[in-house]
Image (cartoon, rainbow, N blue to C red):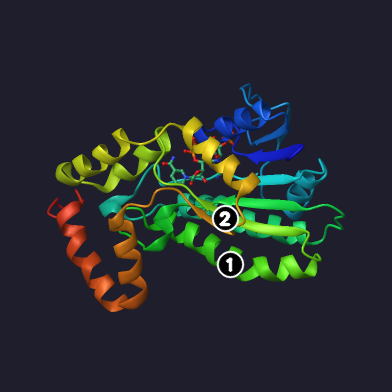
Amino acid sequence: MAKTVVITGISGTLGSALGKTYQQRGARVVGVTRQTDFQGEGYDELLVSPQQTQEDAAKLFSYDPDVAILNAGQIESAVGEQGLPLLELVESMNRINYTWPAIVALEAAKLKRDRPLDVVAIGSIADGSPSCFGPVYHSGKIALHYYWSGVGPIVYYASDKMIRLRLYRPGVIAGPLAWAPVNRLNEKAYQIRANRVNGAPAGEQVAEKIAQWIETSPQWVGTYDEPLSFKLFKYLFALFPNQFYRLQLLGWPKGSKFVGSPKP
Ligand SMILES: NC(=O)c1ccc[n+]([C@@H]2O[C@H](COP(=O)([O-])OP(=O)(O)OC[C@H]3O[C@@H](n4cnc5c(N)ncnc54)[C@H](OP(=O)(O)O)[C@@H]3O)[C@@H](O)[C@H]2O)c1
């Protein structure tokens, strides 16, 4: 059972739920946020951190955690003209969804551990195939997945099997982040998304499942319920990349609110 757990993105839907879950299990929870004046629930100690540099990463491990959950993540909350990604968001999302976890993994690898450490990155079931409706998010999450599967084994053996980089891929969770991808959708596509979001499990339910998985599962990659459509797209992308691209070219004018609207 983990004694100390560090959780980034503690102010968010899943972060605060994870914090409360671990507190109920008797762990000391160190919550991480960028906000200097944050007051919330689900943590015993708060670390205010921009989550950017090697030094920021080293601070996470100064609490000597048994588990570090890299849960902070960002989605495209706004899009530019014609649905193009905004540069500022591309930079900030790539940092928190991919580059920051990659830096933390390297910092973890420097530790001399005499007891196990799990560094669990929170990915997404959306990482299996890119879509024009959430391209920056999907890119960051698949990069994270690649990095964890590629660098994880190196870190594991370099640390004499003490440090495990593990990945958990949640599905949609009830909350504001789940609604963000609607900003490129036309009305018809919006309804499809709305049906998924309205049926989404609460953060508490997902957090409980993740904590259980971290504590008891031998898996390296855990996945919350993955709809069949996500699986099919994933296989299609991997096996037939050109056809998959063509499908996106067909899908964008059908589902987006930008095609057909006059150029500014
Ligand atoms: N919600 C879903 O449907 C869903 C589905 C699959 C996967 N996930 C993943 O689950 C994790 C948590 O999601 P959530 O729904 O709890 O999201 P959330 O409510 O938006 O919380 C995410 C937290 O991450 C921090 N954050 C956001 N952008 C950041 C940045 N650029 N730099 C540093 N910190 C940043 C924020 O904390 P501060 O402002 O306090 O720093 C924020 O409260 C994310 O990794 C997300 O991708 C979510």
Q: Pointer 2: what residue?
A: 167
Tell me if residue 230 comes above or below residue 175 in the rendering: below
Q: Earlier in the sequence, mark 1 or mark 2?
A: 1
| Residue 133 visible in the current orientation | yes
Q: Is residue 225 above or below residue 205?
A: below
The quarter of the displayed image where residue 63 is located = top right
Given contact means CB atoms under 8 Å apart, are the residues at marks 1 and 2 in contact?
yes
Image position of 140 with respect to 176: above or below: below
* Percent position of residue 231, x then y: 34, 61
Dividing the picture into quadrants, the one containing residue 5 is top right
- Judged left or right of residue 154, residue 246 is left
Q: Residue at x 77, y 64 (%)?
A: 161
Question: Closest to the observer: 55 or 79?
Answer: 55
Q: Which mark is residue 149?
A: 1
The kind of residue tagged 2 is Leu
Q: CA distance from mark 1 to mark 2?
A: 9 Å
Identified at 24% across, 38% down, the residue is: 195
Camera-side residue: 109 or 227?
A: 227
Q: In the picture, residue 21 is in which quadrant?
A: top right
Judged from the image, the secondary structure of the residue bearing numbered disc 1 is helix
